Image (cartoon, rainbow, N blue to C red):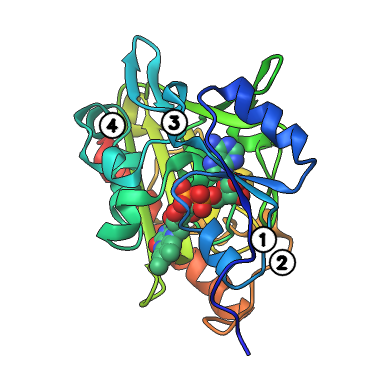
Amino acid sequence: MVTMTSAPFEYEKPESVAEASRLLSKYGGNGKLLAGGHSLVPLMKLRLASPDALIDLSGINDLKGIKSTANGLSIGSMTTYHELESSSDVQSGAPLLADAASQVADTQVRNFGTIGGAVSHSDPASDLPPVVLALDATMVTGSQRSGREIPADRFFKDFLTTALRPNEVLVRIDIPKLPANTGTAYVKMANKASHYALVGVAAVITLGAGGVCERARVALTGAGPHAVRARRAERILEGKVLAGNVIRNASKRVGAELDGMFNEDVHASAEYREAMTQVYAERAITAAVANAG
Ligand SMILES: Cc1cc2nc3c(=O)[nH]c(=O)nc-3n(C[C@H](O)[C@H](O)[C@H](O)COP(=O)(O)OP(=O)(O)OC[C@H]3O[C@@H](n4cnc5c(N)ncnc54)[C@H](O)[C@@H]3O)c2cc1C
């Protein structure tokens, strides 16, 4: 029989990052931070997670809000998908993020789910991890004593595993300003029911003189155990005029970092995901180039 109610738990509502971190230490690995609850609570209902305590982050003001600075955007970890897709600062400063957020699930999930919860959970099919990778974002954490800055490409470690330490809270995500002549795109093959990415590709392309690609960022979700930068594909793109054959060659290498470890589940075989990775990479890079031009 499948249980659809969670095991009993304590409820805590800290008002600061330091207090949340202290509570994480107090419960010694058996306390869970609660953001939008749209990944954690379903796991608890299925008893795949049974924390002793939920530490609700909604009372911490330092985790809220979107700030636009001279260097880019600073986005509080409790910012919801809806706030991301409807913010004019995000639409103009990081259109890739606004667009990807608008592709997540449905209105209800977008009203609750947060950027902090999405990246901290590191679900292999989640939409925002490849976006923060492609945007060269920095994850800023806090704990009882101090904080750290973790580049996005060192943050996602494995299936549901990040570089966050047991007593760390993700405070905000800093996104640098995009260089001039930069185009971005996120495209995904969505699961028809949940809209999670069977395969999703984020591309950020900066063009220089003569249409030569000065800088390429390509990142992948849905295909492997966690989101990854496609560095080998990026190297094929950089320094070249991005004609169709160059984009096609690079797209063939987008899954190279996965070393053959493509996901296989009821939704798609590993071979299918590998093939779709190439198709969606070509679409994302082509769209980003068009946007840059
Ligand atoms: C029906 C449905 C459809 C969905 N479809 C999609 C989809 O199409 N695309 C997609 O990307 N996602 C999808 N999701 C997942 C959804 O986006 C989740 O909301 C998101 O992944 C987690 O964000 P959250 O704020 O709800 O986090 P929570 O569920 O509250 O937390 C998730 C994990 O992150 C930890 N955490 C949360 N905040 C922090 C923080 N600040 N610091 C450190 N750790 C933290 C929690 O302790 C927990 O382990 C779907 C979910 C549902 C229920």
Question: CA–CA distance between discs 3 and 1?
Answer: 32 Å
Crowding near the residue tagged with mark 3, few <14, some 14–19, many ≥20 C-alpha atoms within 10 Å: few
Quarter of the image with the C terminus is top left
Quarter of the image with the N terminus is bottom right
Instruction: Determine which of the numbered discs, if any, sits on residue 90 in the image.
Output: 4
Q: Residue at x 65, y 38 (%)?
A: 155
Image location of residue 211, percent across then percent down = 33, 33
Residue 280 appears in the figure? no
Instruction: Determine which of the numbered discs, if any, sits on residue 59 in the image.
Output: 3
Residue at which label 2 appears: 261
Crowding near the residue tagged with mark 4, few <14, some 14–19, many ≥20 C-alpha atoms within 10 Å: many
Residue 172 appears in the figure? yes
Image location of residue 128, percent across then percent down = 46, 47
Relative to 192, residue 202 above or below: above
Q: Are the two marked residues, 1 and 2, in contact with CB atoms closer than 8 angstroms?
A: yes
Tell me which label, 4 or 2, sits earlier in the chain.
4
Crowding near the residue tagged with mark 2, few <14, some 14–19, many ≥20 C-alpha atoms within 10 Å: some
Q: Are the two marked residues, 4 and 1, in contact with CB atoms closer than 8 angstroms?
A: no
